[in-house]
């Protein structure tokens, strides 16, 4: 059986995170990707990146329309390693936290939770008000992992690409997908130092 990962790209800022994750998995070839891009994400991809939506879809093994509630990934009988929504908008977070499966991203997330598979929500919003925080708690109580795309400055990233790779690498590692996108922390004795 193929090792499958469901990937949802919602309309939050940070579309490059989902695109880079798909690029890495396309090169990895050990994981079959099942992609859903929300209508808002299609707009965000055009605004934030030089990619076309068609180019992003070509990175995935299987692509579904966001309103296709009869898709394979809408059923728990379709075995997967789990799902990542990257980036995850507050609207999508709210749908997941309230089990409101009105579109395929939310339905696939709900299926992932009911089957007790990993669901990673890369929530992209700042600052956060109490309603956002409460939604994150609710999603966590249901079994999701909230994984905000916060940069790790100990790696001393010099470019935006390095920041993106570090975040994507850590998310993939969390899902059990080996990669070399980020340096593994070896303790502060091995950290680079600047002259005072």
Image (cartoon, rainbow, N blue to C red):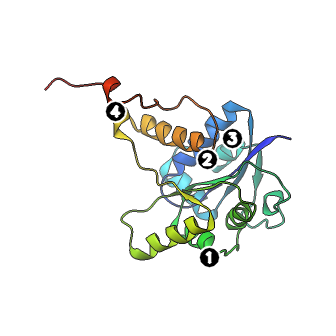
Q: Please identify the quarter of the rendering in which residue 138 is found.
A: bottom right
Residue mark closest to the camera, 4 vs 2: 4
Mark 2, secondary structure of its residue: loop
In-front residue for pair 94/139: 139
Q: Looking at the rendered structure, which numbered label has been put on residue 156?
A: 4
The residue labelled by disc 1 is 98
Name which of mark 1 and mark 3 comes first in the sequence. 3
**Quadrant placement of the C terminus:** top left
At 76% from the left edge and 45% from the top edge, which residue is drawn? 4
Cα distance in 3D space between marks 4 and 3: 29 Å
Question: Quick check: 117 above or below 67?
Answer: above
Report the Cα–Cα distance between label 1 and label 2: 32 Å
Tag 1 and tag 3, C-beta contact below 8 Å: no
Of callouts 4 and 2, the N-terminal one: 2
On the image, the x and y values in percent for residue 174 come to 58, 44
The quadrant of the rendering that contains the N terminus is: top right
Residue 52: x and y in percent read 61, 47
Q: Is residue 99 visible?
A: yes
Residue 189 location, x and y as percent?
Answer: 31, 25
Disc number placed over residue 52 in the picture, else none: 2
Q: Mark 4 or mark 3, which has the lower sequence index?
A: 3
Label 3 Cα crowd, 10 Å radius (few <14 / some 14-19 / many 20+):
many
- Disc number lying in front (3 or 2): 3
Q: In this view, does 113 lie to the left or right of 158?
A: right
Residue at 83% across / 58% down in the picture?
Answer: 72
Say which residue label 3 marks: 59
Q: How far apart are marks 3 and 2 (CA)?
A: 11 Å
The CA distance from mark 4 to mark 2 is 31 Å
Horizontal arrangement in the rendering, residue 32 relative to residue 132 (left or right): right
């Amino acid at each position: 059986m193929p090792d499958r990962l469901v990937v949802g790209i919602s309309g939050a800022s940070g579309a490059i995170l989902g695109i880079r994750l798909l690029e890495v998995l396309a090169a990895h070839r050990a994981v079959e990707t099942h992609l859903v891009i929300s209508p808002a994400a299609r707009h965000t991809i055009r605004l934030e990146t030089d990619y076309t939506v068609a180019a992003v879809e070509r990175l995935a093994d299987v692509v579904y329309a966001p309103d296709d509630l009869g898709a394979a990934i809408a059923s728990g009988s379709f075995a997967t390693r789990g799902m990542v929504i990257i980036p995850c908008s507050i609207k999508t977070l709210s749908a997941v936290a309230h089990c409101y499966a009105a579109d395929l991203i939310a339905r696939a997330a709900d299926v992932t939770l009911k089957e007790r598979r990993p669901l990673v929500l890369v929530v992209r919003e700042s600052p956060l008000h109490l309603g956002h925080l409460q939604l994150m708690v609710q999603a966590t109580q249901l079994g999701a992992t909230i994984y905000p795309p916060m940069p790790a400055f100990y790696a001393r990233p010099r470019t935006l690409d390095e920041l993106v790779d570090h975040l994507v690498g850590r998310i993939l590692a969390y899902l059990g997908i080996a990669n070399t996108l980020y340096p593994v922390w070896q303790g502060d004795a091995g950290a680079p130092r600047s002259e005072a």
